[in-house]
Amino acid sequence: MKRGVLYYRTRIKDANGKLVAIYAKTPEELYNKETLALEQINLYCSRQRTIMYSVEVHNGLYDTKRGRRKMGRDTS
């Protein structure tokens, strides 16, 4: 309770694995805020994976024919 107002709280893990508190005045509002935050975290994480994949392909670290990472770089 803050200044006489009842708040609902939940905690979720962000993209870095840290707990973040989300507050709302009603359970429905809290649910909406939580789902929106989780969608944003998933979108951020999928963008990071896409960026990492494109960097690996560009640098020759990912074998596109076999669909997996190369174990070592060919220096010949």
Image: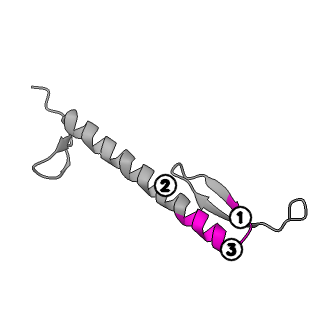
Gap between marks 1 and 3, in whole Å? 7 Å
- Which SS does the magenta portion mostly show? helix
Asked if labels 3 and 1 touch by Cβ distance under 8 angstroms, the answer is: yes
Task: Give the colouring mode of the picture.
Answer: one colour
Numbered disc total = 3
Q: Would you place residue 25 above or below residue 60 in this image?
A: below
Residue marked by disc 3: 27
Q: Nearer the viewer, mark 3 or mark 2?
A: 3
Specify the label residue 41 is tagged with.
2
Q: Relative to residue 6, is residue 32 drawn left or right?
A: left
Q: Which residues are magenta?
A: 22-35
Mark 3 or 2, nearer chain start: 3
Mark 2 Cα-neighbour bin, 10 Å: few <14, some 14–19, many ≥20:
some
Relative vertical location of residue 1 with respect to residue 14 in this rendering, above or below? below
Q: Separation of disc 3 and disc 2 at Cα?
A: 21 Å
Q: Residue furthest top?
A: 76
Amino acid residing under circle 2: Ile
Q: Residue at x 34, y 48 (%)?
A: 49
- Taking the spot 38% from the left edge, 45% from the top edge, the residue there is 48
- The amino acid pointed to by label 1 is Ala
- Asked if residue 31 lies in the magenta stretch, the reply is yes
Q: How far from the left and from the top, in percent, is residue 6?
A: 82, 68
In the image: residue 31, left or right of residue 52: right
Image position, residue 61 (x, y; %): 21, 38
Residue 29: quadrant of the picture: bottom right
Tag 2 secondary structure: helix
Residue pointed to by mark 1: 24
Q: Secondary structure at mark 1?
A: strand
